[in-house]
Each structure stands twice: as structure tokens, then as C-alpha cells.
Amino acid sequence: MSGLFITLEGVDGAGKSSHMQWLPDFFAQQGLEVVMTREPGGTPVGEKLREILLHESMSQETEALLMFASRQENLNRVIKPALAAGKLLLCDRFTDSTYAYQGGGRHFDTGKIAALENWVQAGLNPDLTLLFDVPLAVSRERLGRHGASLDRFEQENDTFFEAVRNAYLQRAANDPARFMVVDSTQPFDQVKEFVEAGLLKFIRQRINAHT
Ligand SMILES: Nc1ncnc2c1ncn2[C@@H]1O[C@H](COP(=O)(O)OP(=O)(O)O)[C@@H](O)[C@H]1O
Ligand SMILES: [Mg+2]
């Protein structure tokens, strides 16, 4: 795999989708061709699974399995082909979300998540993960602002939210080489500048590593 695999993570309302919008132009300016996808979703089957995952009640086991079913489709149809073609693959949520939401939020056995991860990904992991971090109050305020009805995860209580956020921060602390933690409470343009600077550094390191 010669491309670059970058994921965006964080609690709902942290700013992932908003920042996803300027990233393709930024990377294009660096001469990198971008393919974007999201999870759950990103493929015809994945998007159907997303609808089920966000709106139907189900057991924890089913939820974890469907997340990885969607991921398998995304890997086969979108992620691996893009990386094989040397492109930059940007994914809005990936396996860190499963560890944070199903593992942290729902206390689903992380050993089982790891088993699915090993099976489905077979060692394919993101090169870089941007973790957009905001506290509960900011997330709630931003989600409330766009007024749309909340999905199954967004409807969860404060304890769930804190567990998800803490699981993310713990994973970032355990793997600082892969994670870039972004303080997303700052005004949008400031967050953007911080991310741009971090990405330029990352791209330069990658180019140096290959020359
Ligand atoms: N730095 C920021 N300051 C203020 N509002 C923001 C900021 N980043 C994102 N938002 C707003 O917060 C809301 C949620 O952002 P969104 O990108 O949809 O989050 P996510 O995809 O992580 O759930 C949107 O209305 C967005 O415009
Ligand atoms: Mg989003």
C-alpha cells in the first residue's frame, strides 16, 4: 500500500465533518489526490448498514458486528483500492470509533473488538488520526444548534459521552505517533490552522522518510 490513510475521529459535534470539507483542497495543493469516505457507510451496503445502526435498537454484539461489516465493505471497495493507487484516503470515523463508542461507551469487550479488527483489517491501520476533542458542554451546544433530530448515539446520556471521550483520549495517549489531538473548542479558523500546520509537518516527514 503506497497511499496515505488518514482518519478523523471525535465525539458527535466535535467538528469532523466540517473540517472534512476543506481538507481535499488542502491536500490537492500539496499534490495529493484525495478519496473521501465515512463509517459506518461509504459504500452502498455500508450506507444501508449506517441507517440501521443509527436508528434501530439492537444488541451490543450485533452493533459491533455491523460496524465491522460496514468497515469490511469500505476497505474492499474504497479504502484498499485508493491506497493501492497511491491516493490519500480520508475517512470520517474508523476503528477508533468502535473502541470509543462500543468499547468505552457501551463497555463492549475490547478483546472482541480487537479480534474483529485483526480479522477485518489484517494489519491495515491509519497512518494518522486527527482526534477532534471537545468537552460535553461544547458537543451538546453544537449538536443542539443544527436542530436536526438526534441519532441513537447522539441521544446517549452524559456518562456515555464522557466514557467515549475518555476512551478516545486514552487511545491517543497510548499511541502518540499515530494520533494528533486537536483542541476543537477553539474558533473554527484557529482549529483549521492548527490542523494545517500538523498535516504539513506529517506530509514532510513522510516525504523525507521515502527519499
Ligand atoms: N471550531 C468550531 N467552532 C464553532 N462551531 C463549530 C466548530 N467546529 C464545528 N462547529 C459546528 O459544530 C457543529 C457540529 O460539527 P460537525 O462537523 O458536524 O461535527 P461532527 O462531524 O464531528 O459530528 C456544526 O454546526 C459545525 O458548524
Ligand atoms: Mg459528522
Image: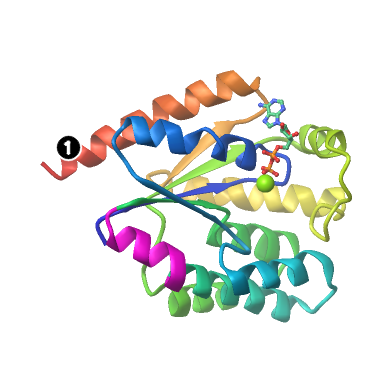
Residue 57 rendering spot, x and y as whole percentages: 85, 73
Closer to the camera in the image, 153 or 21:
21
Residue 108 locus on image (x, y percent): 69, 72
Q: Is 15 placed left or right of 7 in the picture? A: right
Residue name at image x 69 percent, y 66 percent: 102
118 part of magenta stretch? no
Q: Secondary structure at mark 1?
A: helix
Q: Identify the residue at horizontal 79%, vertical 79% (top origin).
A: 59
Q: In front here: 205 or 34?
A: 34
Which residue reaches farthest front?
44
Mark 1 residue type: Asn
Q: Which of the image's four quarters has the C terminus? A: top left
Q: On the picture, is 6 further left or further right than 12?
A: left
> Would residue 110 be seen by someone viewing this image from the given angle?
no
**Residue drawn at point x = 83 percent, y = 61 percent:** 152
The quadrant in which the N terminus is found is bottom left
Q: Is residue 108 left or right of residue 91?
A: right
From the top left corner, tell me how far across and down residue 151 is, in percent: 83, 57
Indicate the quadrant of ligand 1 in the picture.
top right
Q: Give the main secondary structure of the magenta stretch.
A: helix
Badge 1 is on which residue? 208
Up-down: is 209 above or below 89? above
77 within the magenta span: yes
Q: In the rendered image, which quarter is residue 124 located in?
A: bottom left
Q: Residue furthest left?
A: 211
Res. 199 image quadrant: top left
Quick check: can you spot residue 23? Answer: yes
Which residue appears at 60% of the width and 60% of the height?
39
* Residue extent of the magenta highlight: 76-86
